[in-house]
Amino acid sequence: MSAVDSTFFTLNEVATLIWQAADGRTPLSDIVANKICPEFDVNPEQAGRDVEQFVNDLSQHGVLLVSEQPIANTTASPPEAQ
């Protein structure tokens, strides 16, 4: 569910695979080539367009962050004892 506008998303098999693979480090093109195409025997160009549309939809609703660069690990290390 989107915290921005309360849109509820139901994920099919392909969308679930994308969601699980979206780790902030793996490029979308790798997800398409290494996960979607082999699993669903789909044309890479069409799969790429469909996946980009899905990801853009989620991004517009604030459900998924899209970045041109890998997202750095945001977990902070505990402060060192002094």
Image (cartoon, rainbow, N blue to C red):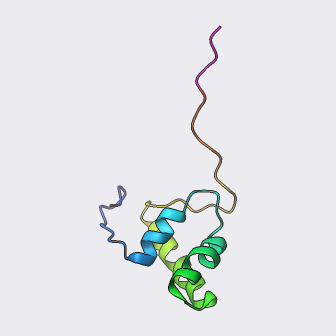
Give 55 or 37, whichever is nearer the viewer: 37
Residue 41 position in % (x across, y down):
54, 89
The number of callouts visible is: 0
| Residue range (magenta) | 78-82
* Nearest the eye: 13 or 68: 13
Q: Is residue 81 magenta?
A: yes
Q: Quadrant of the N terminus?
A: bottom left
Q: Residue 45 occupies which quadrant of the picture?
A: bottom right
Q: For this view, does 14 lie left or right of residue 38?
A: left
- Figure check: 29 above or below 6: below
Q: Quadrant of residue 44?
A: bottom right
Is 25 or 49 nearer to us in this picture? Answer: 25
Q: Position of residue 11 (x, y in %)?
A: 36, 72
Quarter of the rendering containing residue 47:
bottom right
- Indicate yes or no whether the magenta region holds residue 48: no
Q: Residue furthest top?
A: 82
The residue located at (65%, 47%) in the rendering is: 72
Question: Which residue does the image show at 51% across and 85% down from the upper left?
Answer: 40
The secondary structure that dominates the magenta segment is loop
Residue 48 location, x and y as percent? 60, 82
- If the image is split into quadrants, where does the C terminus sit? top right
Tell me: residue 77, above or below residue 52: above
Q: Residue at x 64, y 57 (%)?
A: 25
Residue 7 placed where, x, y %? 31, 66
Q: Is residue 49 above or below residue 78?
A: below
